Image: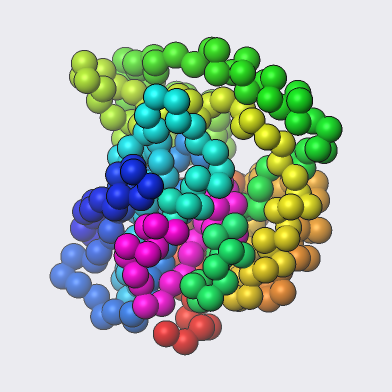
Amino acid sequence: MREHVTFVEANGLRHAIRHFEVTGGAPSNKKTALVLHGFLDSGATFELVAEPLARMGFEVIAPDFRGFGASDRVGAGGYYHFPDYVVDLEAVVRALAPKWLGIVGHSMGGGVATLFTGTFPDRVQSLVVMEGLGPMNEPASFAVERMRKHFADRAKVRPPRPMASLDEATDRLAATHPRVDRVLLRTRAERLTKKDADGKLVWAWDPLHRTASMTPFLADAYTSFLRAITCETLFVSGGPYGWHPPDEEERLACFSRLSRVDFPDAGHMMHWTAPNEVASAVAEHFNRVSG
């Protein structure tokens, strides 16, 4: 499989767009699968899902959100407000101008995908949400505490600490994802790190991402976007070891046209641990909607 990266300027930031193509070409079904990554991840780690999708004729595109992977970071005084990702995505979709658009959103990317699709229901023909229905609900009364936490976190932001080797990066991933095979995690570490200006190995994401958001997550506001989605939606679960907010069923009930699939042993990082199963589920779902 061949990968290449192009760039789209969205809201003053250069966004990296990774394209996955089968070597030698494959018959096109004229459908675009736009894959949106999760928190502290990158479009680069979706290659295991992208290859089978590309072989099935899909144009597979995976952008890096602002401050992740090869995309620009915000400048001095900037921040990563969640709605900014939606604004960026709108500009990216407008620039790419796909004739048929299916979105696959994992984790944080699922949150962005649902907000975008609820806002622009006529621009998305099909949607796949991989455990991406937003974080835990918080009461509005938590707003003051949330703002205080943001400032406390922001005061602790430092330049990334270089890692000695890919082995160290793999160790850190293993601490976060203990159920994922270490050999696989090393290949993820290769795609989630970069060399800094001094040639030292660091994570390819802005440390500012590790700060708490300034505002609480309000499920009532979020679910209004879910109710506005009109296309067929597939929810993909990674089983008991995945990410499931306590009110997941209430959130899922907001979709008007929902189907579900569960991969009980996959866990939350299902695009790493069960890529062929995920690709098959995505393809089957997208192919229900004519091009």
Of residues 105 and 227, the one nearer the viewer is 227
Query: What residue lies at 47% left-to-right and 87% top-to-bottom?
Result: 290
Left or right: residue 81 compared with residue 220: left
Residue 177 screen position, x and y as percent: 54, 34
Query: What residue lies at 41% left-to-right and 67% top-to-bottom?
Result: 33
**Can residue 285 be seen at all in this image of the molecule?**
no
Residue 167 screen position, x and y as percent: 35, 23
Q: Is residue 40 above or below residue 247?
A: above
Choose top left, top right, bottom left or bottom right for residue 14.
top left
Q: Is residue 57 above or below residue 44?
A: below
Q: Is residue 210 above or below residue 231?
A: above
Look at the image and say whether residue 111 sits in the magenta stretch.
yes
**Magenta highlight range:** 90-114
Q: Is residue 288 above or below residue 17?
A: below
Of residues 48 and 161, the one nearer the viewer is 161
Of residues 241 and 76, the one nearer the viewer is 76
Residue 160 screen position, x and y as percent: 39, 18
Query: What residue lies at 73% left-to-right and 58% top-to-bottom?
Result: 223
Residue 230 screen position, x and y as percent: 63, 75
Query: What residue lies at 55% left-to-right and 30% top-to-bottom?
Result: 176
Q: Quadrant of the N terminus?
A: bottom left
**Can residue 1 be seen at all in this image of the molecule?**
yes
Of residues 188 and 210, the one nearer the viewer is 210
Look at the image and say whether residue 135 sits in the magenta stretch.
no
